[in-house]
Amino acid sequence: MRKILLYILLISIFYSCVSKKEIIYFQNDEIDQSKVSNSYKTIIKPDDVLQITITALDVEAVRPFNLAAVTYSTSSNSAIGVAQQQTYLVDTNGEIDFPVLGKLKIGGLTRDELIVFLKNKLEPDYILNPNINIRIANYKITVLGDVKQPGTYPIPSERITILEAIGLAGDLNISGHRDNVLVQREEKGKKVQYRVDLLSKKLFTSPVYYLQQNDVVYVEPNKAKIQSASANSNTSLIISISGVIISLLTAISLLTR
């Protein structure tokens, strides 16, 4: 039994050793400033829920394009209507059904492109000098794997870097695989995967440094944690079997006296 316990202790010590180079972010590499982009563009995708607000000097002219959605809540045996801003779900074809204008194909447009598109539709036939504000109401990202607080996080600002996303999840555990973080996103209706090395400053030039809505960040556990989990599982089995064997040997010893 002592040998088994010693074996477990040695395994724990061996697998708990982590190299400094495996955990420190942004090591050594020079940043190619010509490839670093400070601009970020939100691209409209299917399943986005949009809030579109149109304003102008002519209040009556914009009223048909700012429909109010009403929700009802019951209290004291009476129904109370609460006015909310209308939202528009982008369907699988990248279209929304917009008041007066009807079906509009907007999937794949950036926010700025969508604003120009709507202005061209509205001016001058419907509204003069319209101001258009667009917001994605269901903007979120998901962080999974070997982090302290995995989960899905809403992003009100609609702008987030992969480092900020990891920060929301409480940072990687020491056992997280920092040089091979997976980012999965949807591009033109297809699932696309990127690999990111958090140990390198080349991260700042990655196409997924700025995340997009519904991106999934996955952090793999390193080999030490995987092997440790396997060793712990096997060790439990060995201890159980060893306990049974020791009990049998003890019983046999007592019977043969």
Image (cartoon, helix red, strand yellow):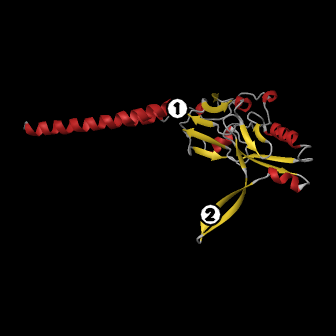
Q: What element carries label 1?
A: loop
Q: In which quarter of the image is the C terminus?
A: top left
Q: Position of residue 161 (x, y in %)?
A: 70, 39
Across and down, in percent, residue 229 comes to 43, 35
Q: Is residue 29 above or below residue 112?
A: above
| Residue drawn at the location 32% of the way across and 35% of the way down | 237
Q: How crowded is mark 2: few (under 14 residues within 10 Å), some or many (20 or more)?
A: few
Q: Earlier in the sequence, mark 2 or mark 1?
A: 2
Q: Position of residue 248 (x, y in %)?
A: 17, 37
User: Is there any visible trace of residue 7 in the rendered image?
Assistant: no
SS state under label 2: strand
Q: How many callouts does the rendering have?
A: 2
In this rendering, position of residue 174 left or right of residue 210: left
Look at 47% across and 32% down and name the residue there. 226
Q: Residue at x 52, y 32 (%)?
A: 222
User: Is 147 positioned to the left or the right of 118 in the image?
Assistant: left
- Can residue 139 be seen? yes
Q: Dot 2 corresponds to which residue?
A: 73
